[in-house]
Amino acid sequence: MPPLPLEGLQTPIANSVTQGSLGNAQEGNRGGMISLGVLIDFIVQRTYHELTVLAELLPRKTDMERKIEIYNFATRTRQLFVRLLALVKWANSASKVEKSARIMAFLDKQSLLFVETADILAKMARETLVQARLPNFHIPAAVEVLTTGTYGRLPACIREKIVPPDPITNAEKRATLLRLNQVIQHRLVMGNLLPQMKNLKIENGRVTFHVKHEFEVSLTVMGDGPNIPWRLLEIDILVEDKETGDGKALVHSLQVQYIHQLIQSRLVDNPSPLTEVYNCLHFFCQSLQLEVLYSQTLRLMRDRLDDHIHVDEYVPGKCLTVSYWRELTSKGKDQANKSDPRSELGYRLTVQVDPHDPARPLAVLHIPSLGTKNFLPTIFHTPIDTIPRETFYTGCFTSIFPRVYLKINAAISSEIRTSLYENEIADRAIHSELLSMERLLVHTIYVRTRSRLTDLKTELQAMLKDIECNLQGSPAILSVAILQPCLRAEQLLITVDTHTGMLQCQVPQYEPPLIPELCNTLNGDHLRLPMLISELRYWITQRRCEKTLQHLPASAHERLPLLYHSDHPLTKISRHRMYVQLHRHPNVVLIVEFKEKENSPCEIDCSFYLAVVKHSSIEDNPVDETIETEIPKVYLKVQTLIEFDTFVVTHGPFTNVDDTLEPGSLKRKGGVKTESSTRRSKQPAYFIAELAHVVAMCDERLPFVTLATELTKRNIFHQGLQVEANATGLVLKLIQLPPPTPEIGQSQAWRALLKRLLSVSIRVYSKGNSKSWMVEFVFYSTPLQSTHPKEQGSRRPVYFQYDIGNADTIARNVDSLLNDWSQIVHLYTIVHDLSEYLNLSSEKYNLSNIFSVKSYNYSKLVLCYGPDKGAMISVTWNATDKVFKLAFGANNNSLNAHSIIREQLECHLNRHRNLAQVVQLLHETYEPLISISKLPSIPQLGVYNARPQVPVQTFTIMPQSCTLIRIAYQGMYCLELRIRGAGLVSLRDGAYSRFDRSNVVDVFSPTQGLKAFLSKYVDESAVFRRRSQSEDDNPPSPISMEIEGGGFLGHHRGPQSPAQQREPGLRFNHPATPPSGSNPHTPASPHTSGMSQPQAHTSFGSSPATSFSPTSLSTNINPSPIPILPHPSPSNLVANSPLNPHVPSPGGLLSNASPGPVTNLPGHSPVSSFMPTGHIDGSPFPSSQSMASPAASNWPGSPSMPRPSPARPGQSPGNHPIMHSPQADHKTGSHLSRVLPQRSWAGAVPTLLTHEALETLCSPSPHPQGLPGPELAPLERFLGCVYMRRHLQRYVLNESYLTAISTNEPGVIHFKVAETLQCRIGLNPQHLQSLHLKITPLAEHKDVWSAEELQIIEKFFDTRAGAPPYKPNSLCGFCSMLNVPVNVLKDFVQIMRLDMMPGLVQQQGFKWSVQWMLRIPPSAIPLVPTGMAGILVYKNKILIFLQITRILGPQYPSATDPPTLVLPLVYDTSTNITQLAEKRDAGPAPAVAAASQLLKHFSQYQSNHIECSLFPAVRELLMNLTLPSEPQQPSPAPGSVPQIQSPAMQMAQGQPGYQVSMPMNMMGPQ
């Protein structure tokens, strides 16, 4: 580091001058040093200074001098900054040089100090000290000063020359100045004083003369003698240049000093000194004013006006002549402008000194003269604030100039004013205060503009008749209203170009193409002006047509490609016309002809012509119009031309286009003055009311004409276009409409409909800018009385609306009209038949009690049905598909599930066209469909254990026909529901074929135990009651015949069992199923060779194995005298679902006929003829076999003792069989006993259930034993348990650590877990709605497990693993949990205990409650896919997922949700360490990180290494885990324990009767 100077780190800053003074030659050779920042500051300051000097000096130099100075400045500055740039670049790399320089500077300073010290000491020794002497002390003076304090011996000359005399007093000053004022006043009175110097002021001993706008001078006298000359004190030049002088003084102080000396020299010995002062200063000021005007003119020419003005002559101190409007002058010399002969002389103004009296102000002379006396008021009194300054340069009329008044000097005498009038000289004076050539030019041009426009106005008024011209504004503008009425924006505006003096014109609102030609005519020969203004009038009228039509459905064109002959009437129309094309009618063109009124050319009359055109090409044959070419048709061939009478078309019925008011109108009083036509008009001037009315009339009537033509083509007769009463609109009334089909035209319903039809009217409905057809059908009443309040009168109007469109859409509109008419007719046919049924005896059919008519408006029928008439059905006819469509709804908070079978009902209605049958079907199927609609259909995740992310629908409802519905559960099990009459339904396993119960169809799997489950809900008393009623009302017939159904709605032969073919006189009705080619599991036709049932056994069943005998037949036949017309069962109406007889239904199942007999029940609706009612599906065994006790049955899951039906659990179980109905009281032995089937296909046999039982099956309800969990339907619980049991059985077979044990108990799974535990899992035999586990340790492990631990595992399975939601991965995780070492499993049991017993958590004072996750929740760390089993065992590692929930304490707000964490715990059996599983790629959340840190701390300080660390680690978490964001917890009160809020605790607390100690015999005999 180099040594630092003594003063510190300061860099020496000294110039060469300072260093040279020290005498060091070596230092001076190296030069001085300066800071780089200071150097840059110096350079910038120098550049700024030079730039400031240039800005002050350049405006006073010529153009070439300014360019040279700017170039020199740029060159010097560039060189300076280039050197600075080189210096800066060198300094960036001069760090070593800087260090060396600092060292050298330090050494130089040290050397300088040594040399200087030696020199000074030597000089003192040799010179100063040699001659040093002490002076003689002045003792007297010192004594006088010290004693008296003064020194009185100074010389007197010092006082006289240094000390000033005392000043005079203020009173003496005032007296002297007052005397001097008197002397000056006397001198002025005695001398000659010019009139221009009368403005004077005497004060403070001086006189001040003020000449306005020229100068101000102050004089005084040095005494009161008459010969003492005037003394000039001060001169102030008042001439200013506010435009180019930048506010600076025009005269330099040196010049003022020179003038001061000159005038002072002339005041000596001058007889008229004051006149000499005025003459000198006045001449100088006038010369200065002319110089200012000249410089302003040069600047205007250079900066803005170029050659538009020119300085013709300039004599300094005398005159300045400027010419303007040079282009107009040049045209005048060429004889091209005849309108203003004065322009040939040129337009000039001269500012000069008055030649007669130089003492007067500057005068202005105009050539040629400004005008006559009429312009003098403008010259003298017009304010310049109305003249924009920018107008002179640009010619625009938008800017505003500051308020300035051009005044005439008051000194002008009356004689000069007289000469101004005589010689037409305007404004010969210029006001020096506003000294501006620009203002002078602007005012002069303004006056000349008004003069020219006034002449043009007079010429136009003489040339054109009744034209209105108005000259006003500044700059002056001549407004010519060429139309009447005329908007301000439509007036022709004429003005003068301030630069050139040429006349210009324009129309503000438009840009007419005639404007250039009109401008040339105005500046040239005016003979063509009337013709051009007339053409402009027509052109503006055409634009008015376009504006009039801008909001109408029409467009205006000046030209159209029309084709017509040379002698066509179209050639006689004037060339001033417009073509109007109607948007909705492309085949029509409206032609508007314009003509000027003879008396008033400013008003335009319109004539209208309507041309019918046809799109054609130039190559079309003009003789034969049928021959057309393929060339694009861009031309319009005129076919017909119709001339309108303007008065007739504008004065139709109740139409008033004129705006004049009648004399007796109440809107005006008689004495009020009539306003002008423009004030009376109701619309703006540009709006042509006649054109708008004609276009609206054509647009309104042409659609009717086109529609009437189209109706005539369709043979639809009408009355022609008519005007409705009071001219409210146009109407087209139809006389007759055709029937939709010939068959309907011959029906009685068609004739009845025509009797009710009163009228059909077609009108146009307008809303905003859109128009549409409104067709009104008026009917007389209806055959059905509805409850709608608007349908109570006799007149029933029906409205249909169609878009009008254009002429091409008229055909579609007629088609839509016919389609709506067919909708009315088709709907009326079925309504007419329904009314016939209602008119019959209500005792016979009872239809009126089944439904009510909510609304019938001939286009839609709305019926209400159901228990409280809350369900609704809407029937409409779809003309596009030519079928009836149904829509279902509900009101009054009711339910309607008929949307499930909507397609089947539509097919049935379209096939039979009988509403009575549909109503009966709705009545019979309402309650069953409401029940099955309660089954959940929401897709669920986690159903597939291998693919938990795939959603699977819970219940899928697949209707096959109106009465046959298949219900699939999770895509594996299928139930077939057949709705029968008399409040009964039948359920069977849909996985079996209808004809071969041992044959299982694809896709679905048989439901094990379905028959036993359904049998618990069979109401035998209701079934027997309905059968006995049928037998009483229908005695057996002795005649052997086919089973038939009779009724007024039709006849139906019920589908029969294949076994019935063996009976004599009976034939098998083939089912509606396709042959075996469609479905290999369904036979094409059943055979009798395989049937070997004894005939003596009577059975009431629809199973294929059911035998049928004449005895049983006699009890089920309803004899009918009506002729029999056999046809298939209604289940055959839709062979497959939906509506396709050749495609297999979902799940590979086909819709088949019901295999059981059908019997009509008396007193029911006619639909009972096709509803399978009146019989009972029984057991496949012969009826002679009495049912044994259910306890003797070995059917899987059958109850071991008689129990009451689940519908009424309060009954006593004694003396009641398991199949006994809970709805009726029976004595012992009074019922039929039955034996549950022992075959695997028992579920294929239909089971009859009442609607109430089906409602119980499908409605969500609590668990029969009160197990915790959501409310589910019993059917869903049963199928879920079967589904879980099936997956568990597969899992047992696939896993190596699980060993299946054979057992004779059907539906029960026995297996061993790793040779330690034996498990038995089966359905609860009481209700078959829950799975239960029974664990038994093997003999060698009996001492390891206590009964309480086993009961905890069993309860955990019952409430968590085998409970809803039914997810197979829960069972997989539970089985994996059992396959762990015994010590780990015991820790698992402890965690289960805390999960299921929240009281333990409260007793031990834990902060967190725990819940075991058997499946991976979505909120867990993504280690394993969501939905998989929550317990994973791999080698010596065990992964479990626990959800812990914070127990809210007093430190939390009351509305705060408790924090919840999902922790993946990994237990290593080899190291006995429990830790938290974490992902490597992403950092854990703060809460999870806190839990992981706590577990690591616990494993580090674990005391007992022999005990399994899993449960102690979990206990540590529940006890001591604290979140980083957790609020500070206050000290708890003694004895207070917070309550647990975990979901598991809530479920356990909701069922207080379920204890941990379960009865050992709950699962039945082992």
Image: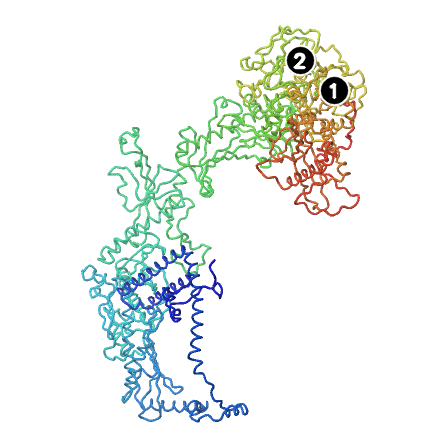
Question: Seen in the image, is 341 located left or right of residue 1542?
Answer: left
Give the total number of marks visible in the rendering: 2
- Name which residue type carries label 2: Ile
Depth check: 1292 or 50 in front? 50
Q: Quadrant of residue 1356?
A: top right
* Location of residue 1242 with respect to 1384 vertically, above or below: above
Q: Which residue is mark 1?
A: 1021
Quarter location, residue 449: bottom left
Indicate which disc residue 1117 carries.
2
Name the element at disc 1: helix
Task: Give the quadrant of the C terminus.
Answer: top right
Hey, what amino acid is under mark 1? Ser
Left or right, residue 508 beside residue 1165: left
Q: Is residue 921 above or below residue 596?
A: above
CA distance separating discs 1 and 2: 22 Å
Corner quadrant of residue 282: bottom left
